[in-house]
Image (cartoon, helix red, strand yellow):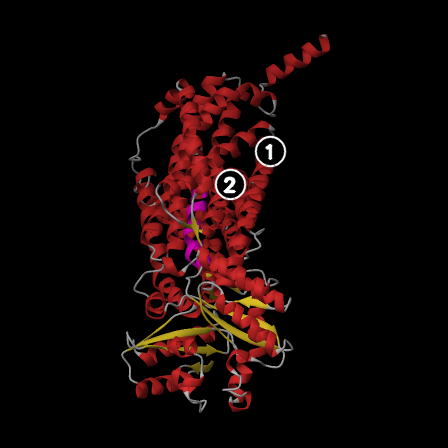
């Protein structure tokens, strides 16, 4: 590794030039990487709800739909508005009061429930449905939503998943840059307080920033990334890779003292030392992100790949770009050195080891309620309910509920060969399900009063294309509620009774599938991350007992972190409960490994238990604190600022998790070392001094 360090030092100027040039293509590809704002699109493609969505687009030419609520508009203006919207690209059909009247039928012959769906005379509200020929999160659909909003100029409110996705897109595009600025400013403050130079944090952030651009620029290989990945990738990469830069700087300073007049030689040794340490440290972080790739809900794969890649770019940047910058601007850096503002924490080591029994008791007392809270923390799956109340889609959903008692809309796809009688009976059964406001299909409209022949082909083909029948069911319940989930189950039972291949699709059925799938994913990801990190620690520390202790300490911190929302009566997003555990484990177990390595080295050098634990804690506490505070700073500001609760909750949990992990490593892990020293020494390699090993072998031979 030393030879590699020497080459990096020698070619530092070409490295800097190349690294800046690479920003150009990466910046271009980043800007052109598509962002997916639809959470539900990450569901497995082989489930009925997703298959049904594809059939709807392929067979009916209809994908997304949006319900538009209009207030205080006369019939003439409403007809003109509907016509304008119908001319928007990719709008397939506009169905409203006037569209039904155009059937040349007296409104009286249509079911009263159908008539009432479109009008609320008491509140002077009218609604109509806009059908698109593209899927709910397609760029064409979102462009169509934007065009409709320009046409209507605030006269109507668009509800539905596509309108929600469009609003999320607007918020993310507005706030994404601000997330990065917040993270950088707060991290810079922490580094200024804890580092011994005012200028070196600038190079830390600059080199990490370049690694972030490389990471985001290479996302084009996956075709697209989710809006959550876009929002969090830069912040998380900064948080989890900053340690590597700090380690390089401290190593460089140590070697500068050894080689005061040979800064190039000092840096070569620092690079060599950093590569060995950082690779070992980064593997656990990568493992945490890799565990997310095992999720059936492929948002985990999306975030896992991007973040694992980000850690790798962070390591590369730390040992190539950062050393080149430090050497190039070394004179300026040395002129800005200062004494770290955070005081020496050396006294804490003795206090913890002297009072370790107390910390074990406190730990046990805290874990009982924490585990209870962890098991009972509430999660939500309805993205709309947590968005800012002033967004167009949120207002529209509220008006839809208040003016028309409508929540979500379900769609049923059944075999076209199903008899009219059976279809009509099925629709009638669906209509009788509690909370269903209206169930309508072609077979529920036609009859003696409305013969099929008088209905234009446009409308018959919309509801029956000869291969599938489409039935619409308007629900009074909101998405992801217990009521709508029970309703979905009842409707599925009904339609399967008439056609075993029938499919129930829509936002609510997709969300119900999401609940079932992510519950399983949570268990899978937790197990995979624990196993991967356990194996890595086993190999790195060459111990049977230490992986159990270290993983147990960090997992306990995760229980505490995830249990707090239960006691604060906070409902967290479903994705947070999955990703927090893996990220907190993978990113903060490094704190424990750092202290354990120091403890191991001291024991190997013949230092007694208490002194070894005290020394390990004293020498590593400052580094662990800086790391935890940096992680906290990078995520906390975003958590407090973001108006999208899914992003805000994840960042707040990560920020809190970093501090909790620090406290666990600073106060609980040393106590475990004090209690389990004998077990650790006898089940691990590299703890017993050579002298002890020699005496052991001598005694064995003598015996």
Residue bearing the label numbered 2: 278
Q: Residue furthest front?
A: 448
Residue 394 pos. (x, y %): 35, 65
Q: Is residue 194 magenta?
A: no
**Numbered disc 2: secondary structure:** helix
State the predominant SS element of the stretch in magenta: helix
Residue bearing the label numbered 1: 538
Q: Looking at the rendering, in which quadrant would you find the N terminus?
A: top right
Residue 240 pos. (x, y %): 45, 45
Check whether the beta carbons of the residues at disc 1 and disc 2 lie within 8 A of each other.
no
Residue 328 lies, with reference to residue 77, above or below; the image says above
* Left or right position of 489 against 334: right
Residue 340 visible (yes or no): yes
Identity of the residue drawn at 39% across and 50% down: 649
Label 2 neighbourhood size at 10 Å, few (<14), some (14-19), many (20+)?
many
* Left or right position of 243 against 341: right
């Amino acid at each position: 590794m030393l030879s590699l360090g020497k080459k990096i030092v020698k070619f530092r100027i070409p490295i800097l030039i190349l690294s800046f040039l690479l920003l150009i293509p990466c910046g271009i590809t980043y800007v052109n990487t598509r962002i997916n704002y639809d959470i539900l699109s990450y569901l497995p493609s082989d489930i009925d709800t997703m298959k049904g969505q594809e059939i709807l687009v392929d067979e009916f030419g209809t994908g997304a739909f949006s319900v538009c609520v209009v207030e205080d508009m006369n019939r003439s203006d409403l007809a003109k508005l509907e016509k304008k919207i119908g001319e928007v690209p990719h709008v397939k059909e506009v169905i409203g009061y006037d569209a039904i009247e155009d059937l040349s039928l007296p409104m009286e012959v249509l079911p009263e429930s159908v008539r009432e769906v479109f009008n609320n005379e008491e509140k002077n509200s009218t609604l109509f449905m806009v059908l698109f020929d593209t899927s709910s999160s397609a760029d064409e659909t979102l462009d169509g939503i934007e065009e409709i909003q320009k046409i209507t100029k605030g006269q109507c409110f668009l509800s539905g998943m596509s309108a929600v996705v469009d609003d999320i897109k607007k918020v993310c595009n507005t706030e994404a840059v601000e997330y990065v600025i917040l993270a950088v400013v707060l991290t810079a403050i922490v580094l200024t307080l804890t580092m011994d130079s005012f200028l070196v944090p600038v190079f830390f952030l600059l080199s990490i920033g370049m690694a972030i651009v490389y990471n985001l620029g290479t996302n084009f290989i996956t075709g697209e990334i989710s809006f959550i990945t876009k929002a969090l990738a830069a912040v998380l990469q900064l948080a989890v890779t900053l340690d590597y830069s700090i380690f390089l700087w401290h190593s460089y300073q140590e070697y500068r003292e050894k080689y005061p007049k040979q800064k190039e030689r000092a840096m070569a040794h620092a690079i060599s030392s950093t590569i060995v340490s950082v690779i070992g440290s980064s593997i656990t972080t990568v493992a945490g992100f890799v565990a997310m790739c095992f999720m059936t809900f492929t948002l985990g794969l999306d975030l896992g790949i991007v973040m694992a890649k980000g850690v790798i770019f962070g390591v590369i940047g730390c040992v190539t770009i950062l050393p080149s910058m430090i050497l190039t601007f070394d004179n300026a850096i040395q002129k800005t050195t200062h004494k770290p503002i955070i005081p020496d924490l050396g006294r804490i080591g003795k206090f913890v080891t002297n009072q370790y029994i107390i910390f074990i008791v406190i730990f046990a007392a805290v874990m009982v309620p924490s585990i209870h809270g962890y098991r009972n923390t509430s999660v939500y799956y309805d993205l709309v309910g947590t968005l800012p109340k002033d967004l167009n889609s949120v207002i529209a959903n509220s008006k839809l509920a208040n003016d028309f008692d409508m929540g979500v809309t379900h769609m049923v796809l059944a075999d076209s060969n199903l008899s009219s009688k059976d279809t009509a009976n099925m629709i009638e059964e669906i209509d009788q399900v509690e909370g269903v406001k209206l169930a309508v299909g072609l077979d529920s409209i036609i009859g003696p009063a409305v013969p099929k022949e008088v209905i234009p082909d446009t409308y018959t083909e919309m509801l029956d294309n000869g291969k599938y029948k489409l039935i619409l069911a308007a629900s009074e319940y909101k998405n992801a509620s217990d009521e709508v989930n029970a309703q979905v189950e009842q409707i599925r039972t009904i339609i399967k009774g008439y056609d075993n291949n029938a499919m129930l699709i829509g936002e609510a059925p997709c969300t119900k599938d999401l609940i079932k799938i992510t519950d399983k994913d949570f268990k899978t990801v937790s197990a995979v991350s624990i196993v991967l990190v356990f194996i890595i620690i086993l190999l790195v520390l060459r111990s049977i007992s230490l992986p159990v202790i270290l993983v147990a300490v960090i997992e306990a911190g995760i229980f505490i972190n995830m249990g707090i929302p239960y006691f604060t009566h906070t409902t967290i997003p479903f994705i947070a409960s999955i990703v927090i555990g893996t990220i907190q484990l993978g990113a903060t177990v490094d704190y424990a490994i750092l202290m354990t390595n120091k403890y191991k080295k001291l024991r190997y050098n013949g230092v007694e238990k208490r002194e070894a634990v005290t020394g390990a804690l004293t020498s590593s506490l400052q580094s662990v604190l800086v790391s935890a505070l940096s992680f906290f700073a990078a995520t906390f500001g975003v958590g407090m600022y973001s108006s999208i609760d899914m992003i805000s909750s994840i960042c707040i949990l990560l920020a809190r998790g970093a501090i909790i992990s620090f406290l666990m490593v600073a106060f609980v892990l040393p106590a475990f070392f004090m209690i389990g020293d004998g077990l650790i020494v006898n089940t691990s390699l590299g703890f017993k001094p050579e002298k002890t090993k020699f005496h052991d072998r001598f005694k064995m031979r003598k015996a």
